[in-house]
Image (tube, coloured by chain):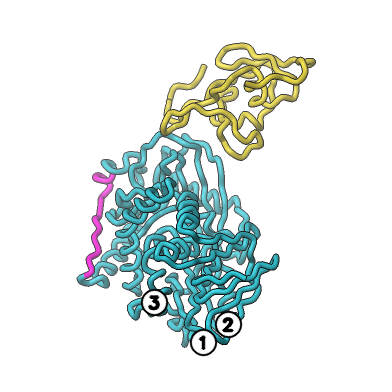
Chain colours: A cyan, B yellow
Amino acid sequence: MKHYDVAVIGGGLLGSAFAYGLSAQGAGVALLDEGDQAIRTARGNFGLVWVQGKGQGMPQYARWSRKSADTWTPFSEQLIEETGTDPGYHQPGGFCVSLDEAEFSSNLELLKQLREEAGDQGYAYEVVDRAALGQYLPEVGPTVPGATYCPYDGHANPLRLLRALHEGFTRNGGAYVPSAKVNKIEPLSAGGFEIFSDGGYRAGCEKLVIAAGHGSVDLGRMLGMEVPIFPVQGQIVVTERAPATMGYPTNYVRQTDEGNFLLGPSARDVGFNDDTQTATLQGITRQCLSAFPQLKRLRIQRTWAALRIMTSDGFPVYQQSAAYPDAFSFSCHSGVTLAAVHATEIPRWVLSGRIPSEYHCFHPARFDV
Amino acid sequence: MFRRRSPVRAPVSFLFEGKEILAEQGDSVAAALLAAGVSVFRHTAVSGAARAPFCMIGNCFECLVEIDGETASQSCLATVREGMKVHRQRCAHSAEPND
């Protein structure tokens, strides 16, 4: 049986970022991936690297998102250099477009509060009225009252990001193990763990990182960690490809570097159902046409639904097991936004054996009453 | 690049860029064009690179053409019809309609 410094359970955007970062820092790492029968949250992302509007009530989450956005450029450059795969990151800043006055004023209020909560950490944004907005987003609709612009925002190609992380991990000597749905984790008396998976794969490790998306709930319990997450379904509409006309990602629409327009967002509470629903797709299309009416010239080519990782306050759940301190569990949505800090910061926490105190706010104990 | 394994028995005639193409009844538009030696179905919207069918089963959207005025049609999923007019896919911004 092979024995690794670290085993990471979960081959999605979180697990792959951790495994890539851990292997880059010299650890011998196995990445255990369940397979395509898993709920593949990392195959459904919209692709925003987004700071704007995040973190109300938890300034540390705003700072964490900002830190990742600030780290994304060197992170992306390193991935390109090491793997030749370009995750397609661009950071022109992003616009949060409002469809009516009510949405505009609540968005302005939110950003004002976030700036106050950020204190001396800095939280830059600009209010752009309808007249000025046309310079930046020439196709914006006549009924849009205005938008806010945040310079930290950007976007990437989530599938190429996932591929680059896997390539980088393998290149660093990491062992990718497919079709390995973990069914038992046994803490060893001498320290470390033994992991058993369907299909018979077994491995030993000194440290263990659970990053298995919705699968983390059951895996966490094996080591006494509660992972209070639930699925929120989101659907995405993709148009045919067109020449680049949208220079900035927005909260409703972004144009990929391949020319497609991605339309969103939506949120439904339907358990683990990942079927699209016509009424939801119509709602997405209606709101995006309201923001950008000229999109109606394009044909829709694909739609899909995926199941976000959600917590009751919307913030991540990061924890170290109290019973087995060499085991960690990390869960969140926004795996694209946070990929840069997940690949650089969290591997240091795991290897040093502790989550720094400024990140204890992400521990699920915050939900205890 | 491709050749038919057997001669056309039940011919269907259609136009590609104004030129007559003979296909076998039941052919997909993509198969008929490939059999007729067409290698460029469209150019990409962003870089202008030439494209032709890749998957032939409706997944990849590489084979888009314009069929009887309907833009961005998947030629691998459309069946040839007598007299149909097929054009290379034009990028979504060109306002000039074909024909």
Q: Which picture quadrant has residue B70?
A: top right
Residue under label 1, please give it. Answer: A323
Q: Are marks 1 and 2 in contact (CB under 8 Å)?
A: yes
As helix, strand or loop, the secondary structure at mark 1 comes to loop
* Residue drawn where x is 64% and y is 61% of the image: A179
Q: Residue at x 57, y 87 (%)?
A: A189
Q: Closer to the camera, A321 or A310?
A: A321
Front tag of 3 and 1: 3
Question: Which of marks 1 and 3 precedes in the sequence?
Answer: 1
Could you tell me residue A104's position as x and y percent?
A: 33, 57
Q: Is residue B71 magenta?
A: no
Chain holding disc 1: A
Query: Could you say which disc has been placed on residue A297 in the image?
Result: none
Question: Same subunit under labels 1 and 2?
Answer: yes
In 3D space, how far apart are the residues under numbered discs 3 and 1 (Cα atoms)? 17 Å
| Subunit of label 2 | A
Q: Residue furthest left?
A: A120
**Residue type, numbered disc 1:** Ala
Q: Is B96 in front, or is A188?
A: A188
Please report contact status of discs 3 and 1: CB closer than 8 Å, yes or no.
no
Report the Cα–Cα distance between label 1 and label 2.
10 Å
Q: Residue beneath label 2, please?
A: A187
Residue A122 lies within the magenta run = yes
Q: Which residues are magenta?
A: A121-133
Place of residue A81 in the rendered image (x, y in percent of width and height, measured from the top left): 37, 49
Q: Is residue A118 above or below residue A48?
A: below
Tag 3 near tag 2, CB within 8 Å: no
Residue depicted at x 50% and y 61% = A174
| Mark 2 neighbour class, 10 Å CA radius: few under 14, some 14 to 19, many 20 or more | many
Tell me, for residue A352, which label it has, or none: 3
Name the kind of residue labelled 2 in the image. Pro
Quadrant assignment, res B76:
top right
